[in-house]
Amino acid sequence: MWESLSATFGKFAEQFPIVFNALNVGFLQTLKLFFVTLLGAIPLGLIISFGSMSKFKPLSKITRIFVWIIRGTPLMIQLLIIFYFPGLVLHKQLWGGGESGRFLAAAVAFIINYACYFSEIYRGGIQGVPVGQQEAGLVLGMTKRQIFFKVTLLQMIKKIVPPMSNEIITLVKDTSLARIIALQEIIWAGQAFMKGSHGISGQIWPLFFTAVYYLLFSGILTVLFNKVEKKLDYFRS
């Protein structure tokens, strides 16, 4: 028995550096998709929220229908449609080939999806600011732009931090869906050792280590968002 355990440990020690390096490469892809999604979805979500609140009825109707469709369908389906539709239906290789093309398609899908979720959070935050404060700003001679940035925006941020933090932490885990179009993120890298990768096959333990990456990253974000919420306590009413 001891010989068997010793052999197993020796094999693990031999394989671990290979697995660790592959998981790091996959996690970098996960991080890249995460940050690119945030950079695109945060401003786009604000634009979409303005469209949904527009007094121009056709624009607000179209925007809300679009948001409803995106929020009401699985992100996985959206990924598949965005990646395969141009080639299968339009017969155009819109995304190009290789890993860079898959990443671009995944980024577009994630940005659109999360922008729609963020837009509803923005809308709730903006509409949650008392109208009387905006009217007071107009009385004081402030422009609508000044009222938004100096009155509405600061209070909106306080209201939206908790729901935004939940969505962003969900995004950490949702990046794993990108493997449906064969983007080589961290779970793809871990699962590859079950099928055969770098001379290693039939091993499930690398998948457990992928969970550690997600737990650590989510934990760091949770701590950061808690600190942000405490910093914004001066807006407590």
Image (cartoon, rainbow, N blue to C red):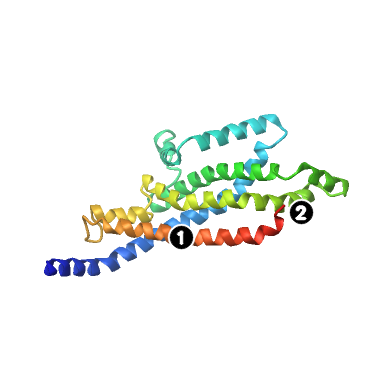
**34, above or below 64, in the image:** below
Q: Is residue 22 left or right of residue 115?
A: left
Q: How many marks?
A: 2
Foreground of the two, 172 or 44: 172
Q: Is residue 89 left or right of residue 55?
A: left
Q: Is residue 212 left or right of residue 144?
A: left
Residue 110 percent across, percent down from the top left: 49, 46
Q: Quadrant of the N terminus?
A: bottom left
For image coordinates 50% across by 53% down, the residue present is 169
Mark 2: amino acid:
Lys
For image coordinates 69% across by 30% down, the residue present is 57
Secondary structure state at the residue bearing disc 1: helix
Residue 122 percent across, percent down from the top left: 64, 45
**196, above or below 13, in the image:** above
Residue 235 percent across, percent down from the top left: 71, 55
Residue 82 visible at all? no
Residue indicated by mark 2: 150
Which picture quadrant has residue 80?
Answer: top left
Secondary structure state at the residue bearing disc 2: helix
Residue indicated by mark 1: 217
Foreground of the two, 32 or 11: 11
